[in-house]
Image (cartoon, rainbow, N blue to C red):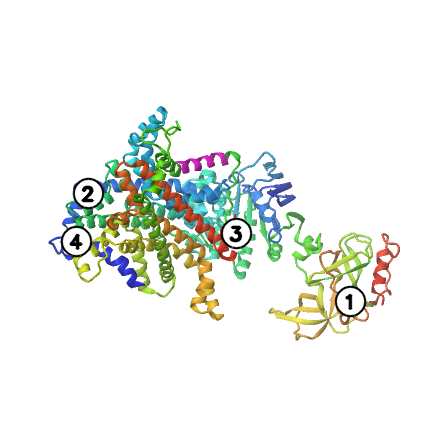
Amino acid sequence: MFVVLGLLLVVPIGAFLLVAVSPKLFVQGTSWLTLAPFGQAFSGAALAALGRTAVCGVGAALLATLCGLPLAMLVHRTNLVGRRIWSVGIWALLLSPSYLVAIGWERLFEPAGVLDHAGQLLTGVATFGRGPLYGPGGIILIDGLKGVPFAYLAISAALPGLGSSFEQAARAHGAGRLGALRVIVPILAPALWTALAIVFAETISDYGVAATLGYDAHYFLSTWSLYNAVYSIPISFPLAASIGVTLVALAGIALLAQRRAINGRTYRVLSGRTRPHTRHQFGRRGQILCGSAVTLFFLVALGVPVLGAVSASLLSSDGTIFGGFHLTLNYYAQVFSDGALITPLLYSLKLALICATVVTLLSVPVARLLTRGGTGRVGRVLDLVLLGAVALPSLVMAAGYILIYNLPVMHSVGLSLYGTTLLLGIAYVAGGLPNNARILIGPLSQLDDGLLLSARSHGASAARTWRTVGVPVLSRYIVWVWLYCFAGTFFELPISEFLYPAGKFPLSVMINKELANYHYSEGTAMEVVAVLGSLMIVALVLGLYRLLVPHGWRQVGATRP
Amino acid sequence: MSAAEVHLDRVCKRYGEVEALVEASLALEPGCFLVLLGPSGSGKTTLLRCLAGIEKVSAGEIRLDGRVASGARTHTPPDRRDLGMVFQDFALWPHMTVLENVAFPLKRRRLTRTASGQRASAMLEKVGLAAFAARYPHELSGGQQQRVALARALVARPGLLLFDEPLSALDANLRERLRVEIGTLAREHEATSVYITHDQAEAFALGDRIGLLEDGRLVQIGTPEEIYGAPATPFVARFTGISGSLEGRLLSAPARTPGVGRVLIPSTDPGLQLVLEATVMAALEPGAAVQVVLRPTATRIIRSGARAAVLRTVIRDGAYHGRGYFYVLGAGAQVDFTGVFDRRRFGRGESVDIYIDPAGALVYAADARTPARPLDADAVLEHTGAPAGSYGPRPSPRTPGLTPSMSMLHQEHLP
C-alpha cells in the first residue's frame, strides 16, 4: 500500500516541488540549489496573479460560508418543505465541475450570448451583469457558489452536536431570539472556520474557472500562470513548481489560520447527554419566505449555468431563445453523429468507470489503515500524505507526472508512460484516492471493531468477515464514493489537460477546445449530453443499489424523517 | 424576585395526531417545590417545556403570577417569564467559561459588569466551584457541570425554577448528593420549583407536592404522604413502589373508601382461596374482579406458625443491604413479592410465613389487561384459606346480599 501511494503521490509531487529549488536535479536548469524561480513567482504577472488568487479565495470562502450556514440550518434544523430536494441540490452542485458552471454563466452573459439574443430587456440585464461577471466579482461568485457544498457539509457535520437545549437555555435565561443566535453561532465557530479554510483552499487550487472565465476576463489566476509556465514557450518547470509551492503554502496558511482561530477549542458538545435537537416549526409565512430564499439560491447556483448551457446548445447562430423560431437540436444530432465529438465522451466514460472502481477498491484499505489504532508513525505519515494531497491543486500533481514520466531516464528504463492512456488513468486514480479515502475515514472510524471481532470469534475468516459485516455496513458510503469519483473523473479538467494522449481528447478537454474555437453550441450540447449521461449513470447505480442490495444494508446510516 | 404563583388550567399540547398533554390542571403556591413523576413519554417534559414557554400550548391556559403566559392567543417567550432552568444535558455553552455561563442570566437584571461578575462568583462559591470559574465546561466532571447548570439557574434569583431530569445522567452516589444540594438551594432561594423525574425516590425526597403523569394526563397531585398512602390509581401505586400484586374478587366492601374490606384470592387448588384483608381504594361492589397491590412495607416475614401469618412463601432470592436483606418471595408460579425486608438471613428455597398489613394492601378494580395469576395452593395457610363457597359476602349497605357475580364465582370454583 505504501509503495502504491509512494509511486502514485509522493514521488511525482515531491519531485515537482523539488524542481522549484533544484532545477538541475531533474534536468530543468543549471542550478543545483537556487531560489530564483521564487523570485519569478513573486514578481510581475505571477505576483499579480497570486494577489488575485488570494482575493478570490477569501471572497469565495466568505460567500460560500455565508450561504452554507443558513442553508445547513434550514435543511437540518427546521421543517422547511423540500429538504430532501435541497440536499440533492447540494450534491448536484458538489458534483458539477467548476468550469461547466463558469461556461453556463458565460454563455448567458457574454457579448452576443444567449441573453443578448433574448430581447431588449434581457439584453439590458446582460449588459449590466457582464461587467461584474467578467472580473473578480464573477469569479468570486462562481467559486463561492461552487464552495457552498463544502461549507454546507462542514457545518452540517457540526449540527448534530448542537442540541436544541443550548438555544433553549439561552432563551430560558433571558436572551431574546437574536441573543440566543449570538450564543449558538460561536458554538459553530470551529465548523465555520473549517468551512472558510476548505473553500479558500479549493478556490485557490481551482483550475476550471481560471481556465474559462478567468482567461476570458483577462483576470489571470495562479493556476492559469502555473499551466502557462508548463505549456507556453519558454517552458519553465521551476517557475511552475514555485507557483505550486506558493499555492500549497497559501492553503497551509489558511489551515494554520483556522487552527489558530479555533485555538484548540473543539467543543465537545456531542455526548451521551446531548438530546437530539427538535426542528424549528415554520408557519406558512416562514415556509414561503425561507423556501423562496433557498429556491432563489439554487436558481442562481444551478439554474443559471444549466439555463446558459442548455439554451446555448439549442440556439442556432442567428436565433433568439424566446422567439422559438431559431431553436434547433442540430447540435445534439451532431454530438452523436460526429465521431470527433462522441469519441471523447465515450473515452472519458470508460476511464471514469475504470478509475472510480480502482479508487473505490483502494480507498477502503487505505481508510481502514488510517482508522486502525496502533499504526503509530506510519499511520501519521500516511495521514499527512493524504491530507497534503487533498490540499494540493490537481494541476501541481499533473505537472509532477509530466516532469517525472517525461524524464529521459524513464524512457531508457522502459517506462515510456508519458502520453499514454495508462498514465492518464494512473493520474486520475492518484487524484481521486486522497479525497475518497478521507471521505471513507468517517464511516470507517464509526465501524465498531467489535462488529468485526464478533464475526471472527464466531468462526468467520477475515475475508468472510469483511464480506458479511464490513461491506454491508459500509455499502452506502462505498456507493457514494464510487459515484463521487466517477463524476469527478468523467469531468476532470486539469489532469486531463496536462496528460491526455495525443489525439485522444478526454471530454473536458474537448469541450474547452470547442469553446475556444467559438463552437459554443457544439461545446455546450456536448456538455449537456455529458451531464445527462452522468446523471443517468448515477440514477442507474442508485437504482441498482436499491433493487439488488438487501434491505438491511440500506438501513445503516439511513436518515430518519 | 419573588416566587411565582403558577396556575395551569386544562393545558393541552398536541404534536399532529399525538396528544402529549391532556387537560393538565394544577395550582402552585409561591415557593412550592413540585415534582412531576412519570414514565418516559408520559408528558412531563412537555408540561415543563410549556411552562418554560419553549412549547406553545394547543389549548388551555398557563398563568404566572396571575398573568396569562400561554393561552389561545398569548404566548410569552421564555426570556420574559423570569425563570431559571436546569436541562437534562445541562446545556452549558461550550465556548463560554464557567463564570460566563453563570453570569449570563444576570444580563436581564441590567447589572454592571462588576456587580454581575461578583454575583456570579458568589454563586459559584455557594456551589463549591469558585476555583473553576475560568475553566470551560468540557474541563469539568459531570457533577461539576451539573453544579454550574444549577448555579446558572439560580444566580438571577428567578421566580420560577424548572428542572428537566437534571440528575438522570449522573451515577447513583453523585445523584444522592446533588439531590440534597438542589433541594437546599432551591428552598434557600424561595423560588417556586417544578422538577421532573422518573425516579420515585428522587420525587419523594424533593417534593413538597408530587404530580403523577400517565399518558399525558396528570392523574394525581398531592403531598408525598397522600401519594404514597392513598394512590388514586393502580398506576400511581405501581409507579410509587409496590412489592407485588394479586388478583381476586372483592368479598366485602367497606362503607366508605378508603376502608378495609376482604378479598378472595384464588389458588391453584380450585377448592381453596385466600381471604385477605386489604384497603379498598375505590367504590367497588362485592363480587367485583379486583387487583390488590402491595406496598413493600406491607409485606413482613413473621414467625412461622404465628396467628397473624397470611401466606407461606418460598425465598427465591436475597440481597444483602447492610442493615439486613431484601428478599424476593414466591407464592406461586408467577406470584412474587419483591423488596421484602428482614434483618435475618434465610437461604434460597427456605419457607417463610408472611404477614400482609391491610393498610399497605390496596384494592382497585381489576385491569382487564392483567392476566389472573393464582397463588400456589401450598402457600395458603389453613386459618387464612377458605374452601370455595364457605365464605359469603359480609352484608354491607351497598351489597345487602350475594350478587350474581358472586354466585358465579362460587360456581366456577366448586368441584
Disc 2: host chain? A
Q: Residue B34, image x and y in percent?
A: 61, 49
Foreground mark, 3 or 4, reads: 4
Q: Compute the Cα span from label 1 to label 2.
A: 98 Å
Q: Residue A3, image x and y in percent?
A: 28, 63
Is disc 2 placed on a helix, strand or loop?
helix
Is disc 4 placed on a helix, strand or loop?
loop
Residue corresponding to mark 4 = A21
A423 inside magenta stretch? no
Disc 3: host chain? B
Q: Residue B88, labelled with which disc? A: 3
Q: Which amino acid does label 3 sit on?
A: Gln
Foreground mark, 1 or 2, reads: 2
Foreground mark, 3 or 1, reads: 1
Question: Are circles 3 and 4 on residues that touch, CB within 8 Å?
Answer: no
Q: In this view, does B216 lie to the left or right of A1?
A: right
Q: Which numbered disc flags the more N-terminal residue, 3 or 1?
A: 3
The residue range painted magenta reads A287-299
Disc 4: host chain? A
Kindly indicate the quadrant of the structure image that contains residue B358.
bottom right
Residue corresponding to mark 2 = A46
